[in-house]
Amino acid sequence: MQTATRTTAPRPWGLRRLGPYPNTVKMPFTTVTVDPDTQVGVFRDADGHAVEMGKHGTSSGTSTTTTTNLDSKNDQGSDQDSQQD
Amino acid sequence: MTETDRPVLVATEPLDLTADMVITELNRKGAPVVRFNPADIGTDLMVSAQFGVCPAPVVGQLRTPSRTADLEHVRAVYWRRPIWPAFEYLEADDARYATAQVRYGLGGILYALDGPLWVNHPLRDVAADYKPAQLAVAQRLGLTVPPTLVTNDPDKARQFTAVHGPVIAKTLRWTPYERDGIPMTSWAEPVATDEIDDTLLSAPHLFQARVEKAADLRVLVVGRQVFAVRIDSGLLDWRTDYDALSYSVVNLPGCLEKALFAVLDHFGLASGSFDLVQDGDGEFHWLLNPNGQWGWLEEKTGLEMSAAIADLLIRGELDGHRT
């Protein structure tokens, strides 16, 4: 039975219902490091200049997702910690 | 940092603007912060703990290039979005070994501490991250849950869709997914009965009756503080167009707040965010999302969410009584 299932339905139905994020915004930085004095992220562009991020990309609101998005990757209730479980 | 300071540990990756908001508040309030990312294990992240050598069951330190935390003095742990090291440069078996040692060594040392308040404890988060369990707990605790089916039986799914339609399908758990390099996610779209076929057999799927909604709400609970934001859009899934959204701060009925507290208490979570749907009759329906984002809502509404989380971390304990 298991073999039959695997040959007839190798990929779950839900995968067909995935769709791309509607828009993506490239965040204006190339590196981020933690500031030793404040412990907050310091963002720099390709020329090494600090970039002010404000609250941009704290979700979705300004940068609806992707690898360039900041938070929506766990917007559906996930924690990196649990991904192996 | 002196020994009497009681630091707040913030576990997250470097790119985390929401954590930055909370850390900024912690700085403003004068609380020492030690930020670290488990993926930095090595010279940039060193941890040591001793057991059985002191009256205290565990003593030790966690060191980053900029800070050192005495583990027995940790006041709270803000477990945001830590990345565990993958050791990609090692052979698969070696990498699996190394990764496990970090998780069970670094993670284990932190779990051994009995002092800090966790926001949230990762093991509790994991336990709460099962939608079928959430639905049952929500209903048990007095929330209204839309009719929902979890199944890998295509016939059952078709029957449910016919009886409860319009029905939407949701993932049981989000995973990173790219197709041709384009990130994908699931969107709430109605399911037609004839769309269901035998590919459903390969895994359980979640189907939920669509609520005729007047508005969506995202609710952040921090300890016993509630921040409820009504999101008006006219969209079935408001994530599809953030430009179309308008936000307003609302008060929830007391009984609903109590039910949300009870859900968090059940799962042992100090903080959580929820998605609710309000129907045309004003009734609230529970939808799923105990870990939704809130950073942009603070920006849109001015609600002092990050300050509330900072206060909770500084206090190091939940206010109010567990029920």
Image (tube, rainbow, N blue to C red):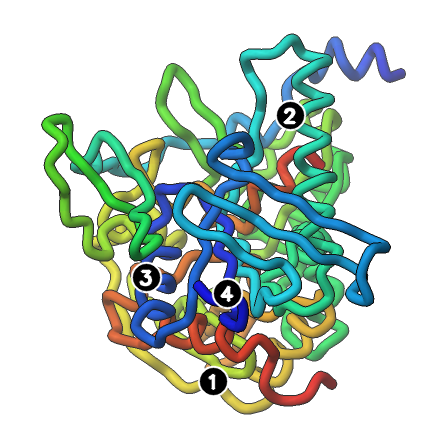
Mark 2 element type: loop
Observer able to see residue B42? yes
Alpha-carbon distance for marks 4 and 1? 34 Å
User: Which dot, 1 or 2, sits closer to the camera?
Assistant: 1
The circle drawn on residue B7 is: 4
Mark 1 element type: loop
Identify the residue position indicated by label 3 in the image: B21
Which residue is at 19% across, 55% downward? A54
Of mark 3 and mark 4, the one earlier in the sequence is: 4
Identify the residue position indicated by label 1 in the image: B252
Residue B100 rendering spot, x and y as whole percentages: 72, 30
Neighbourhood count class around disc 4 (C-alpha, 10 Å): few under 14, some 14–19, many 20 upward: many
Identify the residue position indicated by label 2 in the image: A12
User: Which dot, 4 or 1, sits closer to the camera?
Assistant: 4
Of mark 3 and mark 1, the one earlier in the sequence is: 3
* Same chain check for tags 2 and 3: no
* Three-letter amino acid code at the position of disc 4: Pro
Neighbourhood count class around disc 3 (C-alpha, 10 Å): few under 14, some 14–19, many 20 upward: many
Residue B278 rendering spot, x and y as whole percentages: 46, 73
Neighbourhood count class around disc 2 (C-alpha, 10 Å): few under 14, some 14–19, many 20 upward: some
Neighbourhood count class around disc 1 (C-alpha, 10 Å): few under 14, some 14–19, many 20 upward: some
Q: Nearer the viewer, residue B306 or A60?
A: B306
